[in-house]
Amino acid sequence: MSLLRLENVSRSFGRLLALQNLSLEMDEGQLYAVIGPNGAGKTTLFNLISGFFPANSGEIWFDGARITRLAPERRVAAGLVRTFQITEIFPELSVFENIRIGVEAQMGCSSKPWPSQSLARQINRRVEEILTVTDLVLRADRTVSVLTHGDQRVVEVAIALSRRPKLLLLDEPTAGMGRAETDHMVNLIRSLHEKQKLSILFIEHDMDVVFGIADRISVLHYGRVLAAGTPKEIAADPRVQAAYLGEAA
Amino acid sequence: MRGRLPANVIIWALLLTAPFWLPLIGGYTALASRILIFALGAMGLNLLLGFTGMMSFGQAAYFGLGGYGAGLALVHLASSSWLAVLIGTLAGGAAALLIGPLVMHRRGIYFAMITVAVGQIFYFIAERWDSFTGGQDGLTGFSRQPLHFSGYAISLRDVPFYYFVLFFFAIGAGLVALLLHSPLGHTFVAIRENRRRATFLGIHVERYVWASFAIAGLIGGLAGALNALQNNFISPENLYWVESGNFVIIAVLGGMRSFWGPLIGSIIFIGVQDYVSSILPNNWETVIGALFIVVVLFFPTGVLGIIRRGVRPA
């Protein structure tokens, strides 16, 4: 059974058709990349999946349930967690506190006015786990607004992980990063996929990254899926070369 | 929070001993009670303003309702100061709980405007409903009642009343402190810091704005009840939007992001009000206004922000 399925999804903004009858299917455990030139509709696709705004038509299924009209908070509860192209974190809080907000939401105790000692310990233990996984232990007490861009993007991934996603959506995780930062992020994504068996759908412009780690790729072009397949198939596809890779090269 | 314990100890020690040292520096006990009452009202507001990031301009509504609740309880129900405080607190809290769903969908300036508007409705009701509230002249005919402890009666004169107020201030401040260290408080701050990120972590932001609003109103009601007891009087002025503005000024002066900010702000605000109006009657607001402008322009983190970080103009 597929983890995520979009059926003939469309979305327009005024007269601009951002996505037209788009269908996409992703299985559990995949590391799935969405690529395409600027304006192809990649972020619109993420916004529809995460519930940032609704689709005009079509259906979205996640983990066996129809989520087309579900509020974003409920999609998160269902296991669909995203990051943003422009980093969205809690700027004046420490790395630890940033992650703790997500952990508390995940444990269903965000509204607890007086947590028990054991609950507080449980929360802290989970935050420490995520700090370890994302290699942020040494920065735990730093205020995130003073971190480097690359570290801030890792923090956003860490925040997303705190919700124990069934599917993690990463919108251009390496945007604006230098080589070293990109490598760090790529290693993190790869280890989340391989060690934590996390299903990840990501948008990416850096073709080295895409072809280096994705096990499946969809190419978007003018709001439609131009091609979908394994990296090998995509690289060999003449339509893709004509429409996208050729143009970029 | 580590390392802040000594500051807490000093502040509580000063508050506990205020009636003894305050006269030495030219103050008096009733002034200290007033400072605590307005600090408490501003602390409640600050949960919403400074920690949830919602610009409420309607705290006076709940402060005033608390006052009317306390006054009316003394007039109509029973001669008990405890009951008056309880009824006043619940009046403020219940009103905020009911109003919450009306305001929680709004953001920014729209939130500020709707909180003012709702506050003004209470003001007009209190002003027009002569037979129940005393109308423009305010509600009189009640006075704070002695407290009874197994046969002993303590009359709430100056100093005992200060400790009566301090007792409730401690409860209110303790509640806020507890909240700020709880998951609920963390969630409030998350909303202030990044509403979008909070939503996409599965947090139903509006429900939490509602909760914060209701708690702010509850604490505002408590402060208002104490205010009515201090003055043995409550008037529609306490519900007026200008009073709401006073609470905002107190919070901002002291430092919105700081737990103790509202107390510091109240010391300055009530202190200036008391001192300046004895020299320049009718002009104390000008002085507060000037002070407020200076703080907002140069020290946006308030007086406590200056103390904590050293003087570093923005």
Image (cartoon, coloured by chain):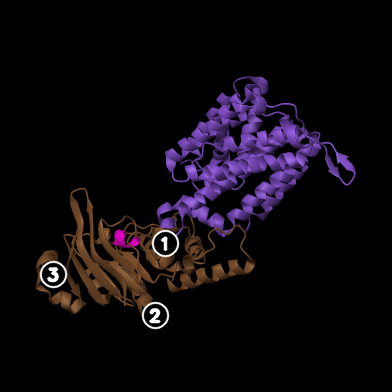
Chain letter of the brown region: A
Which dot marks residue A74?
Answer: 1
Q: Residue at x 39, y 80 (%)?
A: A195
* Quadrant position of the N terminus of chain B in the picture: bottom right
- Residue A59 seen from this side: yes
Question: Label 1 vs label 2: CA separation?
Answer: 27 Å
Q: Earlier in the sequence, mark 3 or mark 1?
A: 1
User: Which residues fall within the magenta stretch?
Assistant: A46-50
The three-letter amino acid code for the residue at tag 2 is: Lys
- What is the chain identity of the residue bearing mark 1? A
Reply above or below: A182 against A57.
below
- Which is closer to the viewer, label 1 or label 2? 1
Check disc 1: other Cα within 10 Å, few if <14, some if 14-19, many if 20+: some
Label 3 and label 1: CA atoms lie apart by 36 Å
Q: Are marks 1 and 2 on the same chain?
A: yes
- Residue A92 in sight in this render: no
Chain B appears in which tint?
A: purple
Q: Nearer the viewer, residue A220 or B255?
A: A220
Quadrant position of residue A177: bottom left
SS state under label 3: helix
The residue singled out by tag 3 in the image is A240
Label 3 is placed on what type of residue? Val
Task: Check disc 1 and report its element: helix, strand or loop.
Answer: helix
